[in-house]
Each structure stands twice: as C-alpha cells, then as structure tokens.
Amino acid sequence: MQVQEASGSEHWNRVKKRLRAELGDDVFSSWFARVDLEEHNDGTVRLSVPTRFLKQWIQSHYNERLMGLWKGECDNVHKIELTVRGAMRPRQVAAPIAPGLPGPKRTKASPASEQRLDGFCDTNQVAAAQAVTAALGRGDASNDVTRDVLQGAALDPKYTFETFVEGDSNGLALAAARQVASGGAVTFNPLYLHASVGLGKTHLMQAVAAKVRASGRKVLYLTAEHFMYRFVSALKAQSALAFKETLRTIDLLLIDDMQFLHGKQVQQEFCHTLNALIDGARQVIVAADRAPSELDTLDDRVRSRLSGGLVVGIQEPDFSLRRNILSTRVNQAQRSYPNFEVPDPVLDYVAKHVASSGRDLEGALNRLVAHNQLTNQPITQEMAEMTLRDLIRSSEPRRVKIEDIQRVVSKHYNVTKADLLSARRTRTIVRPRQIAMYLAKVMTPRSLPEIGRRFGNRDHTTVLHAVRKIEELARGDHGLAQELELLKRMLDA
C-alpha cells in the first residue's frame, strides 16, 4: 500500500507540472495550487479542495483535461473524484414547521435566474436557502440573514500586529494597515494589498479585523469565494435585498483572495457594495495575489474602483527580514518548549536557503521543532540540512539541460531526437531543430559552439542563424511567441 501511495504522489506531481506548463503560472496558482491528492487506488483518483466553489469550477472547466493527463500517467484511471476538505459553511437557519401546519410556499425562480445560478449551488446550499425561505414565511428572515452575514470567516488568533515581523519589503503595507485599524478619518479607501503566497497579506488583514472588531465596530472578513457563496445563497433564498442592506451597514469590509471573484452578477453586486461603502465613508480592504490591473477576470469597473485607492505590494523578504522572522518564531516556540534552542549558524543557514516566503520559513522551523521534540536530539547544522533538504531543494532554480530541451521539443512536435540531430532539411524537422537551438541558447549557459556540437556537430554559425531566425519570426508571429513561452514553462516545470 505504501508503494502505491508513493507512486500516486509521483503521478500527481507530474500531472501538476503538465498543468502548470499548459495553463501558465497564474491560472495554475488560481485553481490548482490548493488541490491535494488524497488517494489513488483501483482506477479512482480522489482529489480534495478547500472550498465547494473551487470543486465546482474545476469539475466544470478542467475535468476532461485532468482525466486526460491522469490517463497519460496511468492507463487504468477511469474516475476522478473531487471532495471538499474543511470548507467553511455558513450557519444554516433552522426552519421547524409545527405539526399540522403547511410549509411555506416555494416561489418558482425565473429561468434566467436558474441559469445564472447554475453551477454555484449544491444540495447543501439549496437546503440552507430553503431554510431562509422558511424564515421569510415567519417574518424573521431579515434578522437571521443579518446575523449570518455578519458572522464572517473565523479569525486566526495568531494573526495580530504584535506577531507580524516588519521589514523593508512589507513596511508600507504594515503602516497602512495600522492606520486603517486605528480608526478616525478614512484615508485609504479601498486599501488594496497584493503579494505572492505566504508573504503576509492574510496576516495583516486579520490583524486589522481583530483590532477593529475589538473596538466594537461592525467588521466582516470574507474570502472572495465565501462572498460568492453567500450572495448566491441569498439569491436562492430570495433574500438578496436583506443581504445587500446588511453588507452596507458594516464599518469595515475585508475581502481576501480577490483573484477568485468570478461571475458577472456577483462582480456587479460587489462593485455596488464597494461603491456604497466608500461613498458612505466606510472602510474596505482587499487582498489578492497580483495588482488590480493584472486581474483579467474582473470587470473593468471593479478593477478601476480598486485601483483608485491605495495599492500596496508586499515583496519577498530579504535575508534580514527572514532572519528576524525566524528569531521571532523561535521565541514563540520557546513558550511551549522552554528547552528548545536553535544555534545562530542554523538560523542563518535556514534564512539564507529558505527564501521564498514567510510561510515556508515557519514550515521549516516547525520541522526543526518536531524533530527536536520527537527525537530529543539538539538542533545542529547537519540535522537542519537533513530535515529541510527537500524544502531547500525546491527553492533552488531548476537548471535546464540541452537534453531536456531536445526531449521536450521532440515530444511537442512529434519528431524524434535522432531527427533533430540528423542532416535532414525538411520543414517539419528544420523548424523544431531551430526552436530547440534557440531554447538552448536562451535557457542554458552553453556557448554557440557547444550547442552546435550537441546538435549533430553543427557549426556555431548554424546555431546563430537558428537563434536569429526564431527571434525574428517570434516578433511577427504571435502564435509562435506563445508556443515558445509554453515550451519554456514546460522546461521550467
């Protein structure tokens, strides 16, 4: 069984690499970065996602592609199952009906409405919507909808301003967040934070939410997916008006993962809510993995409104900040494990080699804590290198080899490696050969003579001609330029 699971994990890693290469980093990060392999057994692949919306989106748009890639890895795969792990469900409103009394009448939704909502709601959402509809019949739905909307997503008590470590890469974002949390006149509205995964966007947003909520003001913190879920549920329950009015009475609205906000009607309602809050001098904070201008799936009006506030990016932490983050987390760990110690050279080693994000740094430190507590062995340089070897290896840039380029190009253009190295001059061979030479020049440190030798002992002038030819063609041929980018992503994956 263990061998089979390891094999399934390897297959899944290759499937993800193919997806990233075909879809690009942005699309892959949006839809597949949080998909995990749960089981691969008896021809069935079971994947899990964090939210119901993500499950439905992947099933609607990528199910066939996933099946094709899995079949390419394992011929016996005949079914892919998607499940939701730990998805937050809004509190369902109980709707008991007294014995002998008829239930509330169900109002038939218009075909247009059904069409708009198709694909967003499953049976659990429908049940919740029917419960709210029943409450409408009793005349108390408005209060229930208000309580449900204002409940928001749970805040992590660890995410406070006191636990946020400041550095040059996040100083402006921290200052803006503190200013918003302090209250007073609304200065930055909306405040838009953008950064890659693990750089502190969610930490700052929840720190603001916690501080403002402690002051007694109305705060709503949601992810974009949860916003869509609640809006669609309100439409199903025909309580959208109460939903909208409740949103517009809050003092602070925080929307995380804005890149996942999809659907024309949902975006329109978000834009209306955004305008109403800003015009009413209520604060809005939005976070995403890129700047507003780069969110191509958003409506132009939403992008324009978000760009009109203070847009602040958080960059990757430098060595000094990474070192401070580790020192802070060590001090926190020592509250639970008083004997836990990490020598300064080990902290320097981790800070130097785990450079992608603060989240990876915390993961690295958690491994050291676990190893120390479970084995009772002291933290040493050798132990750190062994414990963190996969994390450090994954952070190093992949070195592309000429053999990799020849293999990928041959497979992509359905030719053999022998064809690329041969003297054949047919168009179906010449163009892939020139592209392979071009990629070898731009993606490896090899010299032109070395590349020529690796392509059938050709002269360096032949390689130079191929490189210039492909560069010239790519400038005038958008399709070829995209094809080159696809090949580069496949080689980097």
Image (spheres, rainbow, N blue to C red):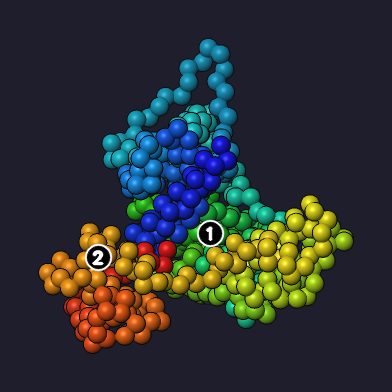
Q: Nearer the viewer, mark 2 or mark 1?
A: 2
Judging by the rendered image, the residue that carries numbered circle 1 is: 256
Q: Secondary structure at mark 1?
A: strand
Whether pointer 2 and pointer 1 mark residues with C-beta atoms closer than 8 Å, the reply is no
Residue positioned 30% across, 36% down in the render: 110
What residue lies at 45% left-to-right and 32% top-to-bottom?
A: 42
Does residue 272 sit above or below 200 in this rendering? above
Residue 196 rendering spot, x and y as whole percentages: 52, 67
Pick whichever of labels 2 and 1 is earlier in the sequence. Answer: 1
Residue kind at label 2, given as amino acid type: Ala
Residue 138 or 375: which is nearer the viewer? 375
Quarter in which the C terminus is drawn: bottom left
Which amino acid, by three-letter code, is at mark 1?
A: Asp
Counting from the top left corner in percent of width and height, residue 233 is at 46, 40
Residue 403's disc is none
In the displayed structure, 370 sits above or below 74; it is: below
Residue that label 2 marks: 418
User: In the picture provided, is 353 more to the left or to the right than 468?
Assistant: right
Q: Residue at x 41, y 71 (%)?
A: 400
The N terminus - image quarter: top right
Residue 486, quarter of the rendered image: bottom left
Crowdedness of circle 2 by 10 Å Cα count: few (<14), some, many (20+)?
few
Q: Quadrant of residue 479?
A: bottom left
In the image, is residue 223 above or below residue 196?
above
Image coordinates of residue 293 in percent, x first then y, are 39, 71
Residue 107 in sight? yes
- Cα gap from disc 2 to disc 1, whole angstroms: 51 Å
In the image: residue 309, left or right of residue 198? left
Secondary structure of the residue carrying tag 2 is: helix
The picture places residue 121, in percent across and down from the top left corner, at 42, 39
